[in-house]
Image (spheres, rainbow, N blue to C red):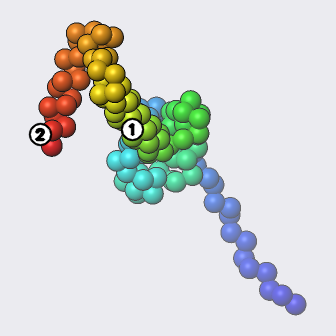
């Protein structure tokens, strides 16, 4: 027969409450990338599971991700950089087209159809591009 181990009294799980301020400060540190969940658990003596639940319950990152269409900030930045390159390329194409029209027809399109501010801006851009 198997021997029964002596029955010990079940350990009582104690509930340790944490202040709202502590929860929010931990969540903010994690969401801003200052520390990881594991580091926060060690630093504040709180279980990882508790921190994960707090993030789900009180965190803003999930809401922000949903607002951004499920993209992380890094993905958003990469997408914006791609759009910027595309717009710069389109601008260069349009400027080249204007120069071709001016050469072919002898009409200064920029002077006729652009405002003074736009002409001045184009001049500044040309000077910058020549100096680079």
Between the residue at mark 2 and the residue at mark 1, the CA separation in whole angstroms equals: 19 Å
Q: Pick the quarter of the image with the N terminus.
A: bottom right
Residue at image location 56% in from the left, 30% down from the top: 67
| Residue where numbered disc 2 is placed | 131
User: Left or right of 132: which side holds 10?
Assistant: right
Viewer-proximal residue, 19 or 59? 59
Residue 71, how many percent across, how many down? Answer: 54, 41
Q: Are marks 2 and 1 in contact (CB under 8 Å)?
A: no
Residue at image location 27% in from the left, 17% down from the top: 108
Residue 103, how many percent across, how many down? Answer: 29, 28
Q: Is residue 95 in view? A: no
Residue at image location 34% in from the left, 30% down from the top: 100
Secondary structure of residue under mark 1: helix
User: Left or right of 67: which side holds 115?
Assistant: left
Q: Residues within 10 Å of mark 1 (few under 14, many from 20)?
A: few
Q: Residues within 10 Å of mark 2 (few under 14, many from 20)?
A: few
Residue 85, how many percent across, how many down? Answer: 39, 40
* Residue, far bottom: 1
User: Left or right of 21: which side holds 53?
Assistant: right
Corner quadrant of residue 74: top left
Residue at image location 23% in from the left, 16% down from the top: 119
Residue 12, how many percent across, how many down? Answer: 63, 54
Upstream in sequence: badge 2 or badge 1: 1
Viewer-proximal residue, 100 or 4? 100
User: Left or right of 36: which side holds 111?
Assistant: left
- Where is 116 relative to 87, above or below? above
| Residue where numbered disc 1 is placed | 89
């Amino acid at each position: 027969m198997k021997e029964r181990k002596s029955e010990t009294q079940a350990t009582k799980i104690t509930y340790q409450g944490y202040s709202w301020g502590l929860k929010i400060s931990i969540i903010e540190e994690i969401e801003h990338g200052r520390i990881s969940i594991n580091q926060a658990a060690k630093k504040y003596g709180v279980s990882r599971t508790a921190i994960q639940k707090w993030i789900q319950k009180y965190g803003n990152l999930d809401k922000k991700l949903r607002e951004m269409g499920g993209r992380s900030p890094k993905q958003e930045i990469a997408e914006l950089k791609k759009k910027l390159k595309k717009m710069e390329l389109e601008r260069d194409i349009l400027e080249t087209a204007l120069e071709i029209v001016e050469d072919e027809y002898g009409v200064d399109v920029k002077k006729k159809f652009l405002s003074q501010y736009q002409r001045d801006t184009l001049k500044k851009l040309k000077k910058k591009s020549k100096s680079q």
